[in-house]
Amino acid sequence: MFIQGDNIYLRALEPEDLSFIYEIENDMKLWEVSNTQTPYSRFLIRQYLENAHQDIYEAKQLRLVICDSVTDKVLGLIDLFDYDPKNNRAGVGIVVQYAEDRNKGIGTAALAMIVDYGVNYLHLNQLYANVAVDNKASIALFEQAGFELVGIKKAWTRVGNTYKDEGLYQLIY
């Protein structure tokens, strides 16, 4: 799979992405948003990549790599998850891994591309995102893309010894 934008493109996972996925999945700063509790081994990630060929109808998820159109540098990941073909909806998550690549429109472009893919190819009725209420950058990203806050899940995510509220954002086409 290859979805081309102006400055970035989205592509399917490749075996060569093992080190990048390993880095992201084991970045403890991201565990809060990914609900991860333990590190992933290279072995488990290799197994995951071997099964990444499953289509969204079978796996109920789609993970795409965000790449720079000029340099082919891997910038991040964007996921559709909890795909529900009966109700035509899916969750969406995104990470631009490196600080030097953030605030350059990469997330905005990738989100617009996955929204377009969801509407025109998967015929989704809606996308949703779960965002911690203190994650101002993600809130701005999703609101700019037309997602609306439809509710707050109180004390939803435990971080250390505290609980954080999480916003539920929806984009209904």
Image (cartoon, helix red, strand yellow):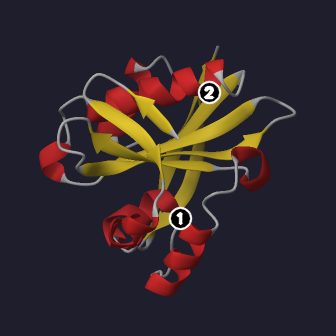
Question: Observer-nearest residue: 84 or 28?
Answer: 84
Q: Position of residue 88 (x, y in %)?
A: 77, 29
Residue shown at the point (62%, 27%) measured from the top left: 118
Q: Earlier in the sequence, mark 2 or mark 1?
A: 1
Q: In this rendering, would 121 be left or right of 46?
A: right
Can I make out residue 104 in this image? yes
Question: Observer-nearest residue: 145 or 11?
Answer: 11
**Image-quadrant location for residue 10:** top left
Q: Which residue is mark 2?
A: 118
Residue shown at the point (43%, 66%) measured from the top left: 31
CA separation in Å, label 2 and label 1: 24 Å
Q: Position of residue 148 (x, y in %)?
A: 53, 21
Can I make out residue 149 in this image? no
Q: Nearer the viewer, mark 2 or mark 1?
A: 2
Identify residue type, mark 2: Gly
Identify residue type, mark 1: Asn
Residue at the extreme left: 100
Vertical comparison of 137 with 25: above or below: above
- Helix, strand or loop at disc 1? loop
- Badge 1 density bin: few <14, some 14–19, many ≥20, Cα 10 Å: few
Q: In this rendering, would 93 be left or right of 6?
A: right
Residue shown at the point (24%, 46%) measured from the top left: 72
Q: Which residue is mark 1?
A: 35
Q: Position of residue 16 (x, y in %)?
A: 38, 67
Vertical comparison of 66 with 118: above or below: below
Residue at the extreme right: 86
